[in-house]
Image: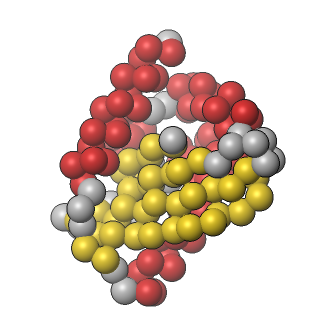
């Protein structure tokens, strides 16, 4: 199961890298997608994988089911207590909005790359 999740995350990461290199967006658009990404991060920190899953587009739902997301729990838990989002940026490429946020935790900071499609659904999720 762990190898399957790793494969899925790797494929999603490749998709995200392909999507990188986009254009900066205006402040209102950036605020919108940063808020949406922060909501996803909140759900992840709470272990509410059903809520995260509800934000996914069809491809993400197929590629990363709720049961597989449970394997993210140790990664998030080892980070410690969530403190704040330190940095955030949004770029647009081919109709997708790529948000990159740095989450500050007590033990280890995390970089979240969350991509949204034109329907405001999560079409990519990567945690580093």
Q: Is residue 59 above or below residue 112?
A: above
Q: Is residue 70 above or below residue 91?
A: above
Q: Is residue 113 left or right of residue 110?
A: left
The image's colour scheme reads secondary structure
Whole-percent x and y of residue 23?
25, 73
Whole-percent x and y of residue 85?
64, 64
Q: Is residue 128 left or right of residue 22?
A: right
Q: Is residue 102 above or below residue 76?
A: below
Whole-percent x and y of residue 20?
27, 57
**x 45%, y 43%: residue:** 126
Whole-percent x and y of residue 120?
40, 65
**x 61%, y 41%: residue:** 50
For the question of whether residue 20 can be seen, the reply is: yes
**x 51%, y 41%: residue:** 128
Residue 72, quarter of picture: top right
For the question of whether residue 48 can be seen, the reply is: no
Residue 67, quarter of picture: top right
Residue 39, quarter of picture: bottom right
- Total labels: the figure holds 0
Depth check, front residue: 73 or 22: 22
**x 45%, y 87%: residue:** 28
């Amino acid at each position: 199961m762990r190898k399957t999740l790793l494969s899925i995350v790797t494929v999603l990461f490749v998709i995200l890298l392909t999507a990188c290199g986009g254009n900066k967006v205006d402040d209102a658009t950036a605020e919108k997608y940063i808020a949406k990404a922060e909501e996803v991060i909140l759900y992840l920190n709470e272990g509410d994988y059903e809520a995260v899953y509800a934000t996914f587009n069809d491809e993400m739902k197929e590629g990363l089911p709720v049961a597989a997301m449970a394997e993210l729990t140790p990664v998030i838990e080892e980070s410690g207590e969530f403190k704040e989002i330190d940095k955030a940026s949004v770029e647009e490429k081919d109709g997708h909005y790529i948000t990159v946020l740095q989450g500050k935790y007590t033990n280890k900071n995390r970089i979240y790359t969350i991509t949204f499609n034109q329907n405001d659904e999560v079409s990519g999720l990567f945690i580093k």
